[in-house]
Image (spheres, coloured by chain):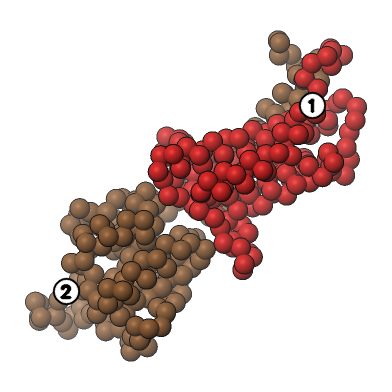
Amino acid sequence: MASRFPPHSEVEARLWAVILVGCAGAAAGEIYNALSPRGVFAPVAVSNPATPAALPTFPPTRPSARPHQVKTTPVKPVEDATVRKPAGPPRVVDLAEVRSLVEKKAAAFVDARSALRFASGHIPGAVNIPSTDFEASFARLKAVLRPDWATVVYCESADCDESDLVLEQLVKRGYVKLLHFKAGWQVWEDAGLPQEQGAASP
Amino acid sequence: MTALCRLILSAIFALAALGGLEHPKTFMRSVGDYQLLPPGLVPLAGATLPGVEALAALVLLLAVFRVPETPGRWRAAVEGSELIVTGLLVVYTVGIASALLRGFQLDCGCFDFLGEHLPFYKPSKATWWTVVRDLVMMVPGVWLVSRQRWAGAGDR
């Protein structure tokens, strides 16, 4: 069937409609995303360290190791309110609190999403423990995640369950200062806050 | 019956599109999880799909109120949209099935909008039940497409 425009038959008109509705919808989607601050083309503030560290360490300076730095960069102890009884569910923290913990380097961060999503962007300093690969990832990262440190776990959004699964496992392993950033990565990203990109370090 | 099928498909695709429009980046990552497209094309697809879904859903919704019986541009647009939504359902179903066969565990990325706004709805992981659900959703689409005249219509 030769394509002519304007179309000469019902079938031709229908196929032209598929192309036109498809193109118009695609154009609308592209324009919406180009204009929306949440759109896929919106710029992100990437804050990767200039020289990638082997693994994020927490606390960044151990007081016992470098006593002379304690005064200038003290590791802020997590307030008692964050210490919970192991029986209860981990306390849910909101964006403001997570942001403050990141800025003060007052907590370790665990991204429970897949390695692919982690690489596309994560909270600065976070390590990746995909809920689908908990055992292997946890074994690799155990050294940088201490049970007595404040540890924030998050996944994509309030609807994801990866953070619940990882929290459950960490509770079983005796982590007592777990915090749940339930709103998740989506909220951090939509707020335009700095993010690190790239795969987890070995 | 035709109107009901169009209404159902319109509702399904409007809800699917709203999720992609509300959180484009999360939707884009869902598209990327399927690992069917080159990474460079994922943002483009993530931006395009909700737009096409939304426009096709709008055409089908309008067709519920005014069902054109005579051939013409409007009828062509409605039937073209029926083809688009049915085709997209086929693509999504094949995509989910292929991801499952490759052993991926991923979010469906289908109705995140409902998950966001309905407290009792939990967005699904992609499972074989998702494939079955998609096949069921395909029924009205296939029925509508099967009613379209493909031969014997003749040139005007």
Residue B145, position as x, y percentages in the image:
75, 30
User: Real-space Cα distance between discs 1 and 2?
Assistant: 71 Å
Is residue A103 left or right of B49 when viewed as pictured? left
Q: Residue furthest right?
A: B70
Q: Which corner quadrant holds the N terminus of chain B?
A: top right
Name the residue beneath numbered marker 1.
Answer: B148
* Point 28% across, 76% down: residue: A175
- Which of the chains bears the disc numbered 1? B
Picture layout, residue A60 above or below residue A7: below
In terms of secondary structure, where does tag 1 sit?
loop
Q: Nearer the viewer, residue B11 or B139?
A: B139
**Quarter of the figure with the C terminus of chain B:** top right
Residue B91 image offset from top left, x and y in percent? 57, 35
Q: Residue tagged by mark 2?
A: A61
Q: Residue furthest bottom?
A: A80
Q: Position of residue A154 (x, y in %)?
A: 40, 66
From where the camera sits, is residue A122 visible?
Answer: no
Farthest-out residue, top: A2
Circle 2 — which element? loop
The picture's colour for chain A is brown
Disc 2 marks a residue whose amino acid type is Thr
Which is more toward the observer, A38 or B3? B3
Is A185 located above or below residue A152 in the figure? above
Residue B78, above or below A167: above
The chain assigned the colour red in the figure is B
Rendered location of residue B73, percent (x, y): 83, 28
Residue shown at 76%/25% (left/top)?
A14
